[in-house]
Amino acid sequence: MSRPLVECVPNFSEGRDAATLAAITAAIAAVPGVSLLDTDPGVATHRTVVTFVAPPEAALEAAFAAIAVAAARIDMRAHSGAHPRMGATDVCPFVPVRDITLAECAALARRLAARVGAELGIPVYLYAEAATDPSRRELSVLRAGEYESLPDKLATLPPDHGPTAYSDAVARTGATVIGARPFLVAWNLNLNTRNVKKAQKIAALLREKGIYRKDAEGNIVRDADGVGVRDPGLFPRVQGIGWFIAEYDRAQISLNVFDTAAAPLHAIMEAARGLAHAEGVVVTGSELVGLVPRDALLAAGRAYLAGGGANPGAPEAEVIEAAIRGLGLRDVKPFDPGQAIVERRVAADGPLVRATVRGFTDTLASSAPAPGGGSVAALCGALATGLAAMVGQLSTGRKGLAHRDADWAALAVAAQDHREAFLAAVDADTAAFDAVMAAFALPKATDADRARRRPAIVAATRGAIAVPLDVLERAAACLPLLATAATGNPNARSDAGVAALTLRAAAEGAWLNVATNLSGLPADERPALRQRADAARDAVVTATEALLATLRAEVAADAG
């Protein structure tokens, strides 16, 4: 079973002093269980974004340690930079990554805030999902006026924790905002101009809250209460400002994208390009600050491939490269997807998937009990869906089939997604087997030993069943893809047939692994799992046999 995992992304008001940044990151990395993923300093912004992941308790400890070091080493009285800020640790959000809810991250944030206020004497405001009042959800509201407004703010907007009176100590540390939020993409779009006003205007037109409406004389239109009226921007869940970055000698549109499904990166980029053109400037590229979710780049890459007339269901590496080119992510500095994509940092390909074909089969053919049939079954699923994706791409734009290009695109994209899941199961199955062996190796000399050992064996066995059962049910879910592939490019008919054969092998092999391990579970758990396994296997066997019969007949007819 996987452990809950939290991402923490503290932003520190220091981008120039390497020693201070090293001390902060060392404090984070020193906490057991923490993986420090990224440190992104900015000289002009005088700000550094640090990203790490950890189990919840370790994340809380590492965040507290980092805030303590920042408070000791950063003097806000001497700070200035392009980015808005309110304290030495300006903002510290927790983000759910795996097996933890946003509400649980909010509870973690409240615990950290209470501790920072009590033990470090720093005023702390809670925001986003951890906010104590709906009016405090937005970071921009809490940070309005920035550090310079803190003496008045403490009186008019008291913090949730820590001192409420301004003092020399508070003047040094400033205030901190702590909360919980969904994954945020921090993204800067580069312009070929030094004109900040143009960047600000484009940012306002893109962001959710939009831009103030003006009358014919250029005055802001106000409602009956005297409040300025805004025309909403183009994209929901997007914040944006414009600024000048001296180190790049250009203006930037700086965006925070809170929902890349509602506001896809490629859609924002193309809208920004259009708005920039209207202003007589050009978006030359962009840079990501911190990490980005895999799905956000896949969506962008697939959109750019489709826009260029290609099938968007290419292998992931090609799709990601299309996104990098389309978004201009190598415009001002190198971009390494292996370092920038959060899923690749948290759960990279396992050793079996990274192995060569010979290396994998050499290990398979050795005396080691793993990898075994479960990993091979998962690999068969990956081979089947890889073939299906290939057929989809070979059918795209083909004479007589082009009217179904949308079908071939959907086939290839879905097949690639399933292929990635099957590949992950190759290593997951071996890891699950190793966990079973480790449980059986636990001491059993005493009654206490045996009382601990038996539940551990059962828990590990559940994991050893969960992986092949997912492979089996995923194979059944892939049947419509093979049915579509069988109607594609006639020259790839044999490939569709081999896909059917390897998918059936995946299902049959996974079923054997599920059935073999069921005896290790309590009797009352077995029937439901066996029923699920039988149903999925029967569906795959029936559908692939019918598909193969059709393909055999077509091939035989063509052969005369």
Image (cartoon, rainbow, N blue to C red):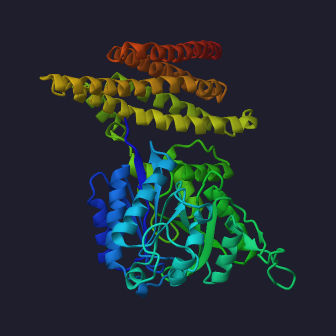
Q: Give percent across and percent down for residue 262.
A: 66, 53
Question: In the depicted view, which residue is nearer to us: 544 or 540?
Answer: 540
Q: Which quadrant would residue 460 be assigned to in this image?
A: top left
Seen at 61% across and 58% down, the residue is 265
Provide residue 85's location: percent of width, then percent of height.
50, 76
Image quadrant where one finds the C terminus:
top right
Q: Is residue 179 above or below residue 73?
A: above
Q: Image height check: is 312 above or below 176? A: above
Residue at 56% x, 71% y is 142
Q: Is residue 103 left or right of residue 6?
A: right
Q: Is residue 156 left or right of residue 53?
A: right
For the point 55% across and 48% down, the residue is: 295
Relative depth, front residue between 495 and 36: 36
**Residue 536 shows in this picture:** yes
Q: Indicate left or right for 238 with 76 as reference.
A: right
Counting every numbered tag in the picture gives 0
Q: Residue 464 placed where, x, y %? A: 35, 25
Q: Is residue 532 left or right of residue 261?
A: left
Identified at 44% across, 42% down, the residue is 99
Identify the image quadrant of the N terminus: top left
Q: Position of residue 350 (x, y in %)?
A: 35, 40
Single out the residue that lies furthest toward the bottom.
78
